[in-house]
Structure formats: C-alpha cells, structure tokens
Image: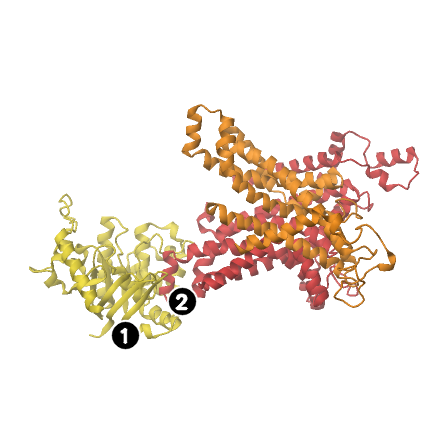
Chain colours: A yellow, B orange, C red
Amino acid sequence: MSVVLEIDGLEVRTRGGQRLLRGVSLSVETGETHGLVGESGAGKSMIGKAVAGILPRGVTVTDGSIRLDGQDLLALGRTKRRRLVGERVAIIPQDPLTALNPCRRIGGQITDRLIHILGWDAKRARLRAAELLEEVAIRDPARVLNAYPHEISGGMRQRVLIAAAFAAEPALIIADEPTTALDVTVQKQVLRLIGDLQARHGTALLFVTHDMGVVAKLCPSLTVLYAGHVVDQGKAARIFGPAPHPYARALIAATPRYDRPEESLLPVPQDVIDALDREVAQADGAHG
Amino acid sequence: MVRLWLSGGWLAILVLAAIFAPWIAPHDPLAQDLFLERLPPVWIDGAEPGYYLGTDSLGRDVLSRMIYGARIALIVAVLAGGAAALIGSTLGLLAGFYGGWTDRIVGRIIDIWMSFPPVLFAILLVAVLGTGLHSVILAIAIIDWTRFARVIRAETMAQSRMDYVASAVVIGRSRLGTLAAEVLPNVLPTLLVLFSLEMGIAVIVEAILSFVNLSISSDDPTWGGMIAEGRTQIHFAPWVLVVPMVALFLTVLSFSQFGEGLKDRIDPVLR
Amino acid sequence: MQNAILRLLTTLVTLFGVAVVVFVVIRLAPGDPIAMMLPPGASEDDIARLRANYGLDRSVPAQFGIWLSGVVQGDFGTSISLRQDVGSLVLGRLPATLELAGLALILAILLGTTLAVIGTLRRQRMAESAVDLWNGMMLSIPDFLWGLIFIVLLGVVVPLFPISGRIDPSLNPDYATNFLLLESLVRLDFRVTADLLSHMFLPALALALPLSAVIAQVLKQSLKEVMHLDYVVLARAKGFTEITVLFREALRNAVLPTLTLVGVQFTFLIGGTVIVEKLFSYEGLGNLAIDAVINRDLPLIQGIVLLFAVLFIATNLIVDLTYAALNPRLRHG
C-alpha cells in the first residue's frame, strides 16, 4: 500500500495571526479510511480545505507540508496545484443544498471535471456519470442528469454529490461532514453508500466528522483534534479500547446513540478541557 | 475628506462668481463685436489682451458669459433642487409617517413617475409649459421630486419605528408635531445629501434644455447655450465649446462628489 | 398562458393610459401650432381652414377619438411641420435609434462585466478601489457630458471618429430597410458596416458609460456574494482556474439580480438617445423628437412619445423573459 496523502507539521493561520491548526501531521494510504474528529471549531475542516486549496479568504498555510502522491502541494504554483488537486482529489461537501449550482443541470456538474480536467470525451463522461448514479442507487439516471438541483430531493442531491466525487476515480476523497445536514435515516444510508463505494473503488478517504459513532463504524484509524492540535492519533481499536485519551473518551460519551436516543449526552468535562488547554499552551511554548 | 474640500472649493468659487458676476466679469456677456469674433484664449497665438478665454462667433467674451452662466446654473440648481426637495420630502415624510393609504398612493405615484425616462419627460414637459427659466425649474421639480420622496419615505419609516417617536406620541404630542419635531431633524442629513446630488442633476438638465434651445432665449448666457453655439464652431473655435463644457463637468462632478462625501461623513448607514 | 394574457391586457391598458395622458397634456400646451405654419398676415379664414384640416377645431375628447381610431388602423396622423405621415416618419427613424441603443447596450454590458470581473478576480485593495473610483466617475457624469467630452477629445483633439451624422453621405447605401447596420452585415457590405460603426461609436459609448457603471457595481456586489457559495468553492477544488470558475459557476447566478436593474436603466438609456442623437446630429427618433417639440408639432410628438412608451414596455417584457430563461427555477411552471 502506498501513501496517498501525507501532512507534516501543518500550521494554518488567519490574517490576524490566530492559529487554526498547530502543527498537524497525518497520513492516509490507498484504500484506507482515516477519520478526523473534534468538536466544531477544532480545525478539522481546515485540514481538508488546506489540502484542496480552498481555505477561506484571509486564511493561509503558514508552515508544514502537504504531499499528495509524494508531490509537495505547497511548493506548486496556484494553477498547477489546483490542476493536480482537481485530478487526484474529490470532495463530498457538507450541505447538499448549497453544493450544487442551481443554474446548471446535474449532468454537467458531474461531468465537467471528467471532461475539462481529465480530458474525457463528452459521451464517455456522460455514460460514466449515469453508471455512477446507478451505483448510488438512483433509479432513473437519465432523468436526474437532465434535472436541475431544485427538482430533486435533498437526500438525492447528496447521493449525486457522492457519485460526482467517485466518478473521476480520484486517489483521495475528502468527506467534510457529509451527513450532518441530513436526517438520521438518510444519514445511515449515505454512510453505508460511502463505505461501499470506497471499498469497491479502493479510494483513500479522509472522513471529517464530529460524530464518534460514525467514526467507530467507518474509520479503522483516526486523528482527534482539539483547538487545531492533534490530541490523539492511531488505530480506532486502541482509541475506542479500554484506555483512550481522556478527551476522546469524553467525545465518545458525548455521542448520541441511535439505539438509546433518550440517554442524556454528557458534555466534555471541564477538567479535561483544562488539561487540554495546558497541553496546547505547552506545545505552543515549545514551538516558540 | 479630500473630495469634500475639492468639490466644496469649486462650488464656493462658483457661488462667489455668480454673486459678484457684474464686478468680476471683464466684459458685458451680451456685448457683440464682430471685429473681435472667434478670438482664441490668451495662451494661443492671436489672442487679444483682456479676452482671457477668447470670444465666440459673435465676438462675445467667453469668460464673461461663463461667469454669468454660473448665475443661471446656480439659480436653477437651488430653486429646482429646493422645489423638488420640498415636494418630495413632504410627500415622503407623510407617506413614511402615516403609512396605510397615504403610503400606498404616494408609492404608486412614485412608481409610475420613475418608469418614465427623465430626459424625455423633461423635454415633453417643457413642450407643454413653454420655454423659459421658470418652466425649466418647474419641469425639474415635477420630474425629480420622486428621488426625495423615495428615500425620505424609507428613512421616515425606519425612524418612526424608533422608541423616541413612540414615546413622544405617548407624552401627548400631536402626530404632526411629532413628525416635525422628532422625525424631521433625523432625516435632515439625508435630505441635505439628496439636495446636493439633485442640484448637480438640475444643472445638467438646464444645460441640456438650453442646449436644445428649450430653456431661456439663446442670447442669454447659459452654459448649455454656449455649448450649442460651440458645437457648431467646433472646428474653428473649439474653446467656445470646451470652456462651458469644463465648467459644467466640474460643477456636476462637484455636486455629486460633495453629496457622496457628505453621505460618507454623516451617515454610514445610507451607503 | 393565463399569465401571458393578463400581461398583454395590462400592457394594452398601460399604453392606452399613456396615450390619454400624452394627448391631454399636449393639448394643454400654450401656443398655436397652426400660427407657426402660416406666413405672417394670413387671413382668419386661412387659419380656420387649416385648423379644420388638422381636426383642431373639435373638442379634445373628439380629437382623441379621431386620433385613436386612426391609430388602431395604423394611421398616426400627419406631421404639421414636416407635412408627412407620422407613422412612416417615426418608423423610418426607429431603426437608427434601435441600432444606436443596441450598440450602446452591448458596449455597456461588455464594459460593465469586464470591470466587475476584474474587481472580483483581483483582490488587491488597489484594483478594487480603482474600479470603485472609475465607477463613481461614470455614475456622476451623465451621457450628455460624456458625449461632449468625446466630441472634443476623440473628434477634434485626436480626430479618430466622425462626430456627426449616421453615415458618410458619399456611401449612400441603397438598402431596403433603415436598419442600415444589420442590413450591411447581412449583405456582407463591410465598408458600410465600418463607416456606420465609426459614426455610432462615440454616441453609443457616451450612452454606455453610465449604464456600464451601474452594471459593474451591481454585478460586482452579487459576484462577491456568489463567489464564496459552496458550489463555487467546490468548483475550485475540481481543478478549474479562477476565471473558469467565475464564468462557468458564478456569473450566471450573479447576473440575475443585475438583470432587472439593467432593464430599468436601459429605458433610461433609450431616453438618453434623445439628447445624444441631437449632440451627434444622428438621424434618429430623438433628433426628430426635439425638432417636433421645438416646432410644436402635436401629432408628431404624440406618435413619438407613444413609440417610446412601446419601447419601454417591450424592454421590460424582454427583461422578464430573459430572467425566466436564465433562472431554471422559474422555467417550468
């Protein structure tokens, strides 16, 4: 197995100097699913955005390296980098309602990357898109390809986005909380779908979520983030095992369970937070 | 800040020139002298001393005509702008303050009014009212009151929802008294900005109308009339066109920049 | 379908209203158009005969009735000053004005879009404030002044373009219609096309500049909003260059709010042709309108104003249709 994505000492700051990621390192191999967990604001989405080169305005990578297939992305120019990422990486976005252009037909939005970045001819791209739509269990692909986003349901749109991500056979897929905007029953279906497709296509998957339950089902290895800082990293078996990091344990405790929804959720205890803050401050001090 | 000073400076010069025109102007703006026709400005060879900006095809002094032209431009700007402001803000205040039927009727009229392009409207009105300064002023006021009404109405609506208006009514002040005492002072800055912008528009409309000979008689020194005369002489005596054009350009730009500058200074919300 | 019928009906009512208002307002005008037609010292009898000839001896409602029944049959009366059929006079000039306004619109859209795109793509403060400054200038200077400035700078100081007329009289194309520009294109008569364009360029540009600023301003604002919507960000991650992303994903959505405004502004542009045509001695409707007003030519004024009203209504209709065509959410229904 080869390493697809290798991040080393990644630091991301806002223009004002606030650090969103403080020296994050991780690697994802072909066919592997790696979970990125943390509370909102922990910086987990920033990692995916930094890899894809779509950090928000005023936010930049200030240190570290991102290697895709061994190529240092940060050493490339903007256009070259965007091209390489376009060829090798796909994203499954968080909100299917806003991730499709309301003015363009679905078909074009799936195929434009195949045609314009990968250089396929239009006919082949369209066949491929139809094929993928069938793979994500859309019954009438021809109709959906010709439809506008407002003509299909939210769950269907998310499946379209998943199909679009897998269509180009990328080396890496970044799934950025792909289920948060969906209701619980649809969530399960979508997760199973992503898992199946990933297994079949052998794609590396970076799965960003705040939901420990999802991670437990989907990700053999994971990284736990707190305030842009890697708190724990390793095999799921260990972290979900008898002796996890206290913060990971707190996150697991804070996860709603489908089988016992009435059970009250435990917030992350204050002493755990305090310990984490000390840890982060220490690491910062060591960094300079 | 700079633009407030620059535009304000030019407007101040203009006002002074207009007021003291008889003392400043080197010649009678109407005096024709066929021996002195189409003299170039002083920096071009062949100029006659005393005629700083040259003369037109009838030998009239361009500088003096420009100075007297500023008079007419400013009279129209102030009177037409003032009349438009008076009609527009009165209706806007009433519509915004009372709401309901008053508001609906005023709103409808504004919509209808604004759907008609102003230049065409102006020409049609002057055709009806007859030519002359008073009809130019009247036409501008009749057309442009909507600019005031629209903004003042919205502003008044916003102000009327404020607590101090409600409390004034509670204390027992009459509705109209509240409108005058509480709301009016608060929309005054906006009114001032609009007035400055409107004066620029009035100047240009007057120039257009006198250009097509629908304002006062073509002998009288107006910038538009000078431009019309200069347009026919453009290849022989370009300065006859260029001088009033520059004056018009600076004045229109100054009024609008002065308005915009005021807007930035007094009310960041308006932007 | 029902919508379309309703639309048509309101349009007709609006037109009727415009016709009534214009008719009545113009009759209120002081001054006797007939007196201007006759040599001084004409007898009372002559004047009365001429009045009867033009129907001016009847009451205003009766005059309106006669005029309206004529209009319905396509007869707009006879121009008093030019002694020609108003309908053919006005329709003869219309193509010149339409071509001028059309060219101006195209220039405005090209300029405005370019400015908006530059302002969006170049994120440096310098570029943005340069675009803003330029916009401020364009907005505060009206078309009349732009026309004058162009006449001086590009007609006299650096004589690149002709400053009066529609076409070089020596060309004198013998065309079937007065859509000279379009017809020269169809006939591949490019010498005529080039001459027409060089005559139209300055007046069209003068009309286009203020509109281009409006387009640039509104389009830049809505592009700014659209550019960080999810699907645009996603398109960046697909590997497209920034400019492709802008044109393919963002522009179409950003255009929608701009469109309505451009419609309103375009009617102002059509109004602006009146003065700009006069300034450039361009033989169009506007030039005719001013002459008609100066000569108090009532039937001609009526005909022209009615035609302008039709143009405004048509513009609004076209805008609505384009809006629906560009917005898929409105298309099926």
Q: Position of residue C70 (x, y in %)?
A: 74, 38
Which residue is pictured at 63% across the width and 50% down the height?
B12
Q: Position of residue A179 (x, y in %)?
A: 25, 54
Q: Position of residue B173 (x, y in %)?
A: 47, 25
Q: Is residue B119 left or right of residue A61?
A: right
Residue extending furthest toward the bottom: A70
Q: Which residue is mark 2?
A: C240
Q: Is residue A66 left or right of residue B115?
A: left
Badge count = 2
Instruction: Classify B70 as above or below A78.
Output: above
Secondary element at tag 2: loop
Of residues B49 and C18, the one nearer the viewer is B49
Residue extending furthest toward the top: B172
Secondary element at tag 1: loop
The answer as to whether the residues below labels 2 and 1 share one chain is no
Instruction: Classify A150 as above or below A4.
Output: above
Q: Is residue C209 left or right of residue A56?
A: right
Say which mark, if any, is on residue B256. Answer: none
Q: Position of residue B141 (x, y in %)?
A: 65, 39
Crowding near the residue tagged with mark 2, few <14, some 14–19, many ≥20 C-alpha atoms within 10 Å: many
Residue type, label 1? Asp
Give the quadrant of residue A196: bottom left
Which chain hosts label 2?
C
- The answer to whether residue A124 of the structure is visible from this angle is no
Residue extending furthest toward the left: A242
Which residue is pictured at 59% across the width and 43% down the height?
B195
Of residues B201 and B126, the one nearer the viewer is B201
Residue extending furthest toward the front: B23
Which residue is pictured at 73% across the width and 53% down the height?
B66
Q: Which residue is mark 1?
A: A69
Residue type, label 2? Phe
